Image (cartoon, rainbow, N blue to C red):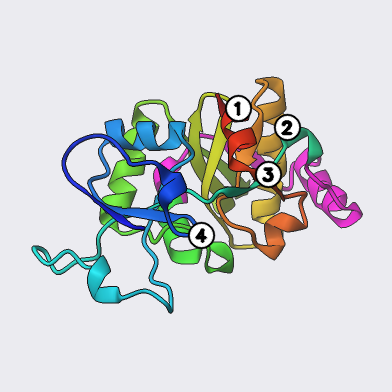
Amino acid sequence: MIYLLDSTIGFPDPKDGEPDGLFAVGGDLSTQRLLLAYSWGIFPWYAFRAEDNCEALINPDTGKPYIQWWCPMKRFVIFPNEIHISHSMRQQLNKVQQGELRVTFDIDFRQVIDLCGKLREDGIGAWLGQEMKEAYTRLHDEGYATSVEVWKDDTLVGGLYGVTLGKGFFGESMFSLIPNASKIALIMLARVLQQFDVALIDCQFETPHLKSMGGRYIDYDEYLKLIR
């Protein structure tokens, strides 16, 4: 079942949704709604699937797609202390130690989200229209969204961003302009999250890229206990 949300800040039980996790459309991207959503492992996404009745996902008042709200019952996550670093990636990390590449946090969130919108990997991640960019930039300005940047000299060559809330980091999107830059960002993020006792990185959906780095599925009930 897919619910239509109104202006009330709240969500129905996501366990009543579709098997792939889509359970509601509509509502808004206010900070209050987004924080409530992430506290339950719910995230917004714009995506049409082959089996969808696309007309049902279009707001008749605006002619634009509804915001879609997803909450898969099988959660694809990376535990920060389990992140897999291959031999070849260890060689790439040496470039950071040697100063060839530089990694920062929250230095240029806006450029990261812009490049994620243009270059998101594997085609996975929220379609980043202006409304989405503005919503996550507000979250960043209020201290809830984080970016990781990988620089070569003064050029941003890779990175990722996501929401930090409770014991979870909820990854939204990543990009690379040179090979492995997003993997470097993810590894450095995992190292920092371990220091702050963050339980997991929510990957939202499985990709070969993330699976190769240690991503695996856990049940939603276990996931909720960990992020709380």
Q: Nearer the viewer, residue 225 or 165?
A: 225
* Amino acid of disc 1: Lys
Judged by depth in the image, the label closer to the viewer, 4 or 3, is: 4
Q: Earlier in the sequence, mark 4 or mark 2?
A: 4
Q: Earlier in the sequence, mark 4 or mark 3?
A: 4
Image: 226 above or below 182: above
Question: Furthest residue to the right?
Answer: 87
Quadrant (top left, top right, bottom left, bottom right) of the C terminus: top right
Q: Name the residue that disc number 2 marks.
A: 191
Judged by depth in the image, the label closer to the viewer, 4 or 2, is: 4
Q: Nearer the viewer, residue 108 or 212?
A: 212
Q: Name the residue that disc number 3 marks.
A: 218
Q: Secondary structure at mark 2?
A: helix
Q: Which numbered tag is attached to residue 19?
A: 4
x%, y% of residue 47?
39, 66
Locate residue 139: give its quadrant: top left
* Amino acid of disc 2: Arg
* Amino acid of disc 3: Ile
Spatial CA span between label 3 and label 2 = 21 Å
User: In this image, 66 relative to 222: left or right?
Assistant: left
Q: Secondary structure at mark 1?
A: helix
Q: Secondary structure at mark 4?
A: loop
Local crowd size for mark 3, using a 10 Å CA cut-off: few (<14), some (14–19), many (≥20): some
Question: Furthest residue to the top?
Answer: 196
Q: Are marks 1 and 3 in contact (CB under 8 Å)?
A: no
Spatial CA span between label 4 and label 3 = 15 Å
Q: Earlier in the sequence, mark 2 or mark 1?
A: 2
Q: Name the residue that disc number 1 marks.
A: 225
Q: Secondary structure at mark 3?
A: strand
